Image: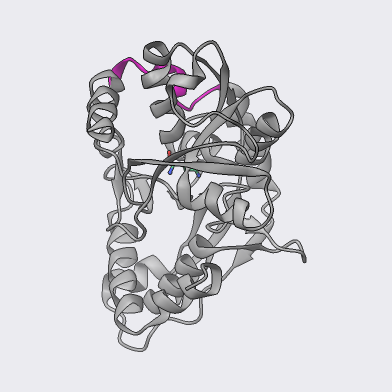
């Protein structure tokens, strides 16, 4: 019941939540800068022998795909400094399957959507939730991972409900569904929301006591907790939206089509499951 009420409240207030929107000139500048210093370049293997005419045209192009910086297990830097994760491996497998080339630019979540809207990249893969509001602006691929928003507090915190947030400050990440959800219940429960640019600084704010809780996709904060982050997740998880690969509406229909075909193929041939098993304990 609580879940349902919270969700409908989020839906009702969705349009009023400008505070969590992405898009400032600062992030655009950051995205541009990052784009020129692309860290991780991957060219897919050669196209399959039976490519269609459309795929041949597409394969001439190197798509610029923006992503988040720290959103494990979907994208993060490993010990060697390589950008790895479920999103990275899915994109690679799909590109190999469909025979297109791409370059990944990790700029942060809000900067990635800003760059997409400014035409500075062709697509975004960043654990990005497929929401009705976003579908008005973007074309999404078929969903590739189910998620939802959870609230995390210090491991020894006695905050065990939204009610206990009264009079407190909570952390959220700019432009995300977690932020939108936090703002949608902030007045009701009497707390303030401070926005952070990336997940790592948001967690740090909770660890440092600048905020008593943060709202984040539960598979992501859960992954960090399983690796030693000193937070705990509350059992209430808000039903959320699945992740999809996004392009600007109508701009790259062939890319979305290839992504969907490739995704279906890697699901059928076991590669998709293999990727999940690499990052998520069975
Ligand atoms: N899934 C969340 C959203 O789409 C967060 C994505 C992210 O932070 N990379 O809003």
Residue found at x 49% / y 32%:
160
Q: Quadrant of residue 81?
A: bottom right
* Res 67 seen here: no
Q: Is residue 147 above or below residue 274?
A: above
The colour scheme used to paint the residues is one colour
Q: Quadrant of the N terminus?
A: top left
Residue 85: where, in percent of width, then height? 56, 63
Residue 111: where, in percent of width, then height? 55, 36
Residue 119: where, in percent of width, then height? 45, 39
The reply, left or right, for residue 103 in relation to residue 177 is right
* Res 92 seen here: yes
Is residue 244 found inside the magenta-colored segment of the image? no
Residue found at x 67% / y 46%:
36
Count of numbered tags: 0
Q: Is residue 138 above or below residue 99?
A: above
The reply, left or right, for residue 216 in relation to residue 130 is right
Q: Is residue 175 above or below residue 39?
A: above
Residue 230: where, in percent of width, then height? 68, 44
Residue found at x 50% / y 20%:
165
The reply, left or right, for residue 108 in relation to residue 21 is right
Q: Which residues are magenta?
A: 15-24
């Amino acid at each position: 019941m609580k879940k349902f009420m919270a969700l409908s409240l989020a839906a009702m207030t969705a349009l009023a939540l400008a505070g969590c929107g992405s898009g400032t000139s600062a992030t655009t500048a950051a995205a541009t800068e990052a784009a020129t210093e692309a860290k991780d370049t991957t060219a897919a293997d050669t196209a399959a022998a039976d490519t269609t005419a459309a795929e041949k045209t597409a394969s001439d192009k190197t798509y610029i795909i923006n992503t988040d910086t720290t959103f494990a297990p979907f994208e993060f830097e490993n010990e060697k400094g390589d950008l790895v994760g479920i999103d990275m491996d899915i994109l690679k497998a799909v590109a190999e399957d469909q025979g297109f080339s791409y370059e990944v630019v990790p700029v942060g979540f809000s900067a990635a959507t800003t760059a997409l809207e400014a035409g500075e990249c062709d697509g975004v893969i960043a654990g990005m939730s497929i929401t009705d509001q976003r579908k008005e602006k973007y074309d999404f691929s078929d969903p590739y991972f189910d998620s939802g928003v959870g609230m995390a507090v210090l491991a020894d915190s006695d905050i065990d409900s939204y009610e206990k947030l009264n009079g407190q400050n909570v952390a959220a990440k700019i432009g995300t569904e977690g932020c939108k959800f936090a703002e949608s219940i902030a007045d009701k429960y009497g707390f303030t929301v401070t926005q952070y640019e990336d997940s790592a600084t948001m967690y740090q704010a909770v660890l440092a006591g600048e905020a008593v809780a943060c709202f984040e996709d539960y598979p992501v904060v859960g992954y960090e907790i399983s690796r030693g982050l000193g937070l705990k997740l509350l059992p209430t998880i808000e039903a959320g939206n699945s992740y999809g690969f996004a392009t600007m509406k109508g701009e790259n229909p062939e890319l979305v089509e290839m992504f969907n075909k490739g995704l279906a193929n890697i699901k059928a041939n076991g590669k998709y499951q293999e990727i999940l098993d690499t990052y998520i304990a069975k």
